[in-house]
Image (cartoon, rainbow, N blue to C red):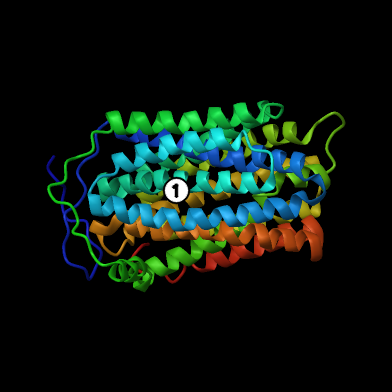
Amino acid sequence: MKATTTDAVPGSPPVTGPPAAGRGLLPLLAFANTSMYALYLGVGSVLLPLQIEAIDPAHKVATLGMIGGVSAVFATLFNPVAGALSDRTGRRSPWILAGGLAALATMALLGNVHTVLLVTIAWCLGQAAMNIYQAAVTAVVPDRIPRARRGTASAVVGLGLPVGGTVGVLVASQAADSLNTGYLVLGAMVALAAALLTAFGREPHREHRRPAVPLRQQFQAFLSALASHDFRWAFIGRALLVLGYFLVSGYQLYILTDHVTLPAGLEPTEAIAVLTPISMAAMAISTVAGGVLSDRWDRRKLFVGLSAALTGLVTLVPVISPSWTGMIVFSALNGLAFGCFMAVDTAVVTLVLPRAEDAARDMGVLNIASAGPQIVAPFVAAAVIGHLGGYTALFLAGGALALLGALAIVPIRNVR
């Protein structure tokens, strides 16, 4: 397939741009991302907290924080490593398929373990599998989508978060009495998406594989992306925003159980099944609108900065009103803000990659800004809840971090 015109970063040697994407690629990528977020949110928001509560109810907050933090180490390590390996082999499809099938196997394991240790091991393996899958899927956009369509493509792909989040939480909530079924359904979605994308995605043939290089040189190259000014600030902004977001979202079930007064007869799992579609519908609207308008106006920093700031400010709503109504308003506004941020920020990232030929590796490094804060977030959240003022302090801490993330967008130079 013939390549488009040059798609290089200013100051770097010219590189060949991505080929025009086939008509069916974006729907396949949308489903791949939808299944990924369905598993992440269904497991993280419902299934795993319920499993931990059943195993160790007296220490559920600290135990969930420990498991979330340890497993996120695996996410942080496997994402960029898998990205670098797929760069070197010149193929994405084998890594997508291997990660998807491994995700199904690890979900089957997770649904059949009954101790904190075994849950920790199984979820760590699940994070490893999912991040192999995610690294390769994420690289398809800079690989095969022309520069002028990055915002629109990122918006379409970004719909995977609101749609997948809704599906995942609804599936998990319906499986509250049969966790194993919930795990299997979510794992099967990822495996199916991986099979469809690799079978019908028509990955273009690459003539040459990347040569093998010494381990030390690989490590130096792995970190070299952070030497790029714009890439570094994009990394910092995303890391702060994601850390603030996960401080709150990782404990939503326990917030609804222990902090918010729910209407009579409404169970916390049922409440999540109500709040998630509200948040995700708002997220879907802002994802599409933000991606398309940022392309049309060529003003991506403005969208990213304002949405990050709004993500921080809306955490005041449940502080002022720790009620069911307050949580509904918070969910809607948080969905609007976070959806726009993730859609447009993904487009920004693809435009500040230091080297097009290292796209998957550098996107993997950037994904540390998404996975890395999840290592810290559970420990920080557990400490804040236990020692610094409970869930009210948790909302305030999350909001402050998101506002700092908004400020980190300002120094980026080569994106408007």
Residue 298 is at least partly visible in this image:
no
Left or right of 180 on screen, residue 92: left
Residue at the spot x=40%, y=41% of the render?
A: 99
Task: Please tell me which residue lies in front, 87 or 9.
Answer: 87
Task: Please tell me which residue lies in front, 67 or 411.
Answer: 67
| Image position, residue 119 (x, y; %) | 63, 44
Report which quarter residue 169 is drawn in.
top right
Report which quarter residue 92 is drawn in.
top left
Above or below: residue 24 compared with residue 93? above
Task: Please tell me which residue lies in front, 222 or 329.
Answer: 222
Above or below: residue 32 compared with residue 401? above
| Image position, residue 357 (x, y; %) | 23, 57
Residue at the spot x=79%, y=32% of the render?
A: 267
| Image position, residue 47 (x, y; %) | 65, 37
Task: Please tell me which residue lies in front, 10 or 247.
Answer: 247
Residue 155 is at least partly visible in this image:
yes
Identify residue for label 1: 131
Q: Quadrant of the image for the C terminus?
A: bottom left
Q: Amino acid at mark 1?
A: Asn
Residue at the spot x=16%, y=46% of the render?
A: 206
